Amino acid sequence: MKNFFAILGGMGTLATESFVHVLNERTPNHSDQDYLNYVLINHATVPDRTAFILGKSEESPVAALKEDIRQYSALEPRFFVLTCNTAHHFYDELVNETTIPLLHMPRLAVQAILKKFSNLNRPIRVGVLATEGTIQSKVYENELNAFENIETIIPQQEIQQQVTNLIYRDIKEQNFLNEELYFSILNQMIDEQQCDVVLLGCTELSLMQEATQDETHPIVDAQSELVDETIRLALEFRADS
């Protein structure tokens, strides 16, 4: 197979399934051959990223992710897509394992915010919803704070606990898409914390957004931005071949 990319997924599997579904749904197509060529690596046994970052587990996910990159680099994909937001904490370590480009989901999301809210004549108040591991490791905060016209809003502890419950208790453990809790969290970030936009920095939250098709809240979904960039690059490589 030529002109394909590799998806580093399985963190978690339902979120990866959501990414692939949205990817296929958005790909312009009129026949089987119009869809994109890709290899899906659903590495479900990668140790939990948040547990390791927070010191709750000694099992690092890095070795497993590096192994995936080395193994699939041998197939010479055009680029890698990493579908787990929290895993981007290890991005610099992972890119050193290959000469093949690895897309950076948080940076794509931040660029989308800058573009969509460029007309504001004051700093953009961006609320970050993510796992505790992503929040503690400042995966998104560091990217956002690089811009003077962005004010990063980290959820208060009570809201963060609700986000954690939604991601782990409801989705990962129960396969339950808790729409009531999801909308409550969004409303708190917008109404109470006065956010201009809420950045969905966890693929389980992207799964919630896909399921609800919510258009009533100002949202930038990191996974959605990654999907769009993946399609753009894949079609560009196809056209050049």
Image: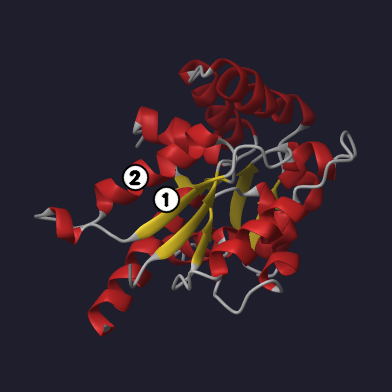
- Left-right relation of 227 to 67: left
Query: Mark 2 to mark 1: distance in Å?
Result: 8 Å
**Which secondary structure lies at badge 1?**
helix
Q: Nearer the viewer, mark 2 or mark 1?
A: 2
The image quadrant where one finds the C terminus is: bottom left
Q: Is residue 172 visible?
A: yes
Number of other residues with Cα within 10 Å of mark 2, as a class: few under 14, some 14 to 19, many 20 or more: some
**Which secondary structure lies at badge 2?**
helix
Residue 30, percent across and down?
Answer: 9, 55
Residue 194, percent across and down?
Answer: 60, 40
Give the residue at x 52% y 35%: 13
Give the residue at x 15% y 53%: 32
Query: Which disc is residue 114 wearing?
Result: none
Report the front residue among 85 and 97: 97
The image quadrant where one finds the N terminus is: bottom left
Does the residue at mark 2 contact the one at mark 1 (Cβ under 8 Å)? yes
Amino acid under disc 2: Val
Report the front residue among 123 and 22: 22
Give the residue at x 28% y 49%: 24
Report the front residue among 179 and 196: 179
Query: Which disc is residue 224 wearing?
Result: 1
Report the front residue among 117 and 129: 129
Number of other residues with Cα within 10 Å of mark 1, as a class: few under 14, some 14 to 19, many 20 or more: many
Residue marked by disc 2: 22
Residue 172 to residue 32: above or below? above
Q: Is residue 103 visible?
A: no
Q: Which of the two labelled residues, at mark 2 and mark 1, occupies the earlier sequence position?
A: 2
- Left-right relation of 115 to 237: right
